[in-house]
Amino acid sequence: MTPKLKAYRAKREFSKTPEPVGGLVAGEGNRFVVHKHHATADHYDLRLQVGDVLKSWAVPRGPSLNPADKRLAVETEDHPLEYIDFEGVIPEGEYGGGPMIVWDTGTWAPMDDVEKSLRTGSFKFRLAGEKLNGGWMLARLKPKPGEDEGKSNWLLFK
């Protein structure tokens, strides 16, 4: 079991949710997925394969193709690679309860060193999906006083 999935597993009761437990797939590749998720609030989840996990951000208003639009992207826990194809209904009362579909999928490529970019908060990448293509950037925002530093807020823009 990869320790990177500890937070993911701690939030879920796998006897009640159809979500994958994860950790069964080796981590080579560069796939991405955007899930449309109807939970407490409708939002989109951007997930990029980085090694043996999917780095994940909740994007409340979804990605925009307009470069002038900057969208809030809240960093969430890493998800297992098996989640890339997941569609289904997470039962009400469970973490993230509600229907989820694959809205877009494809491959991605970093424009700089991934680990350094994530650490410094300036992450540039290219997407080659069915709906989303071209250059994108995630820029980490500085936390406001009193904000939970465990959940980083980023801006996503084309």
Image: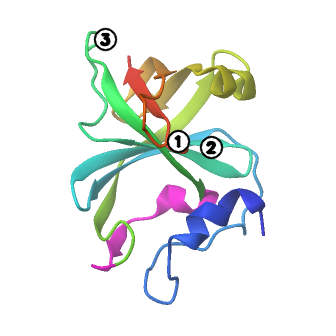
The residue lying toward the viewer, choosing from 109 and 60, is: 60
Quadrant for the N terminus in the image: bottom right
C-alpha span from label 1 to label 2: 6 Å
Disc 2 secondary structure class: strand
Q: Residue at x 72, y 63 (%)?
A: 25
The picture places residue 53, in percent across and down from the top left corner, at 66, 51
The picture places residue 131, in percent across and down from the top left corner, at 33, 33
Q: What residue does disc 3 label?
A: 67
- Where are the magenta residues, as a range? 80-93
Identify whether 44 is placed above or below 64: below
Q: Amino acid at mark 2?
A: Gln
The picture places residue 109, in percent across and down from the top left corner, at 62, 26
Badge 2: how crowded within 10 Å, few (<14), some, or many (20+)?
Answer: many
Q: Magenta stretch containing residue 4, yes or no? A: no
Sequence-earlier tag: 2 or 3: 2
Q: Amino acid at mark 3?
A: Pro
Q: Amino acid at mark 1?
A: Phe
Q: What residue does disc 1 label?
A: 32
Badge 1: how crowded within 10 Å, few (<14), some, or many (20+)?
Answer: many
The picture places residue 15, in percent across and down from the top left corner, at 50, 90
The residue lying toward the viewer, choosing from 120 and 24, is: 120
